[in-house]
Amino acid sequence: AQTIHQWPVAEIKAVGSPLSLGCTIKGKSSPNLYWYWQATGGTLQQLFYSITVGQVESVVQLNLSASRPKDDQFILSTEKLLLSHSGFYLCAWSLDNYAEQFFGPGTRLTVL
Amino acid sequence: QQQVRQSPQSLTVWEGETAILNCSYENSAFDYFPWYQQFPGEGPALLIAIRSVSDKKEDGRFTIFFNKREKKLSLHITDSQPGDSATYFCAASDGEGADRLTFGKGTQLIIQP
């Protein structure tokens, strides 16, 4: 069975500090991977997607970057956090294009 | 311009009743519509999905009705249970660009026992 793990579970960071969030998929080979952001009580906004190692496409610009260093790993990062980065970050995977997306448990980020 | 709209924003029904959640969209190219269920503090879970070649999709107590001409769809939850209390998101995709899903703002469903 496939499992998706996100770390950390929650993070409290200061404005201007760096950030790194991680996502690991187990049980699936070469999945498509996605990062989403969700404001508290809000909708989900897709940020990045990746269909293979080393390739990441940006969907919206939020002063964030993403990387896929391994087939089963997706990293979201920034060198300088803004207050507006607060929210719930979700990683998702799908088998290929035009397929169902499955979400991880999320990381709650609070920027102070 | 919001491409996927959901109504109502919040809905309360009694246990055992049928809850009806509505969704409409702007982009005629959208042809895949998943619904997600999200509990507080958790990631969304795929509940049921429909492709535009169908006008109905059923899975247990959950049914999607789809009207392509009017660009509308609805999620019916029959025999509602308190455990169904959650936020439900309608999403849409046109199959381009590796599954760029566009989400609605969600409907918060409360089932009163």
Image (tube, coloured by chain):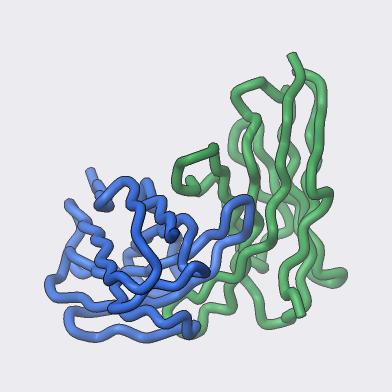
- In the picture, measured across the screen, residue A78 lies left or right of residue A37, that is left
Task: Compare residues B57 and A42 and report the one nearer the observer.
Answer: A42
x and y percent of residue A72 in the render? 17, 64
Q: Residue furthest left?
A: A70
Q: Quadrant of residue B34?
A: bottom right
Q: Which chain is blue?
A: A
Task: Compare residues B108 and B100 and report the one nearer the observer.
Answer: B108
x and y percent of residue B104 in the render? 68, 62
Q: Residue furthest top?
A: B113
x and y percent of residue A17 in the render? 30, 70
* Residue at x-position 56% and y-position 59%: A39
**Does B57 sit above or below residue A45?**
above
In which quadrant will I find the N terminus of chain B? bottom right
* Residue at x-position 40% and y-position 75%: A97
In which quadrant will I find the C terminus of chain B? top right
Q: Residue furthest right?
A: B70
* Residue at x-position 25% and y-position 52%: A7
Task: Compare residues A70 and A21 and report the one nearer the observer.
Answer: A21
- In the picture, measured across the screen, residue A82 lies left or right of residue A11, that is right
Q: Quadrant of residue B38?
A: top right
Q: Which chain is green?
A: B
Task: Compare residues B107 and A38 and report the one nearer the observer.
Answer: A38
* Residue at x-position 54% and y-position 38%: B40
x and y percent of residue B111 in the render? 73, 25
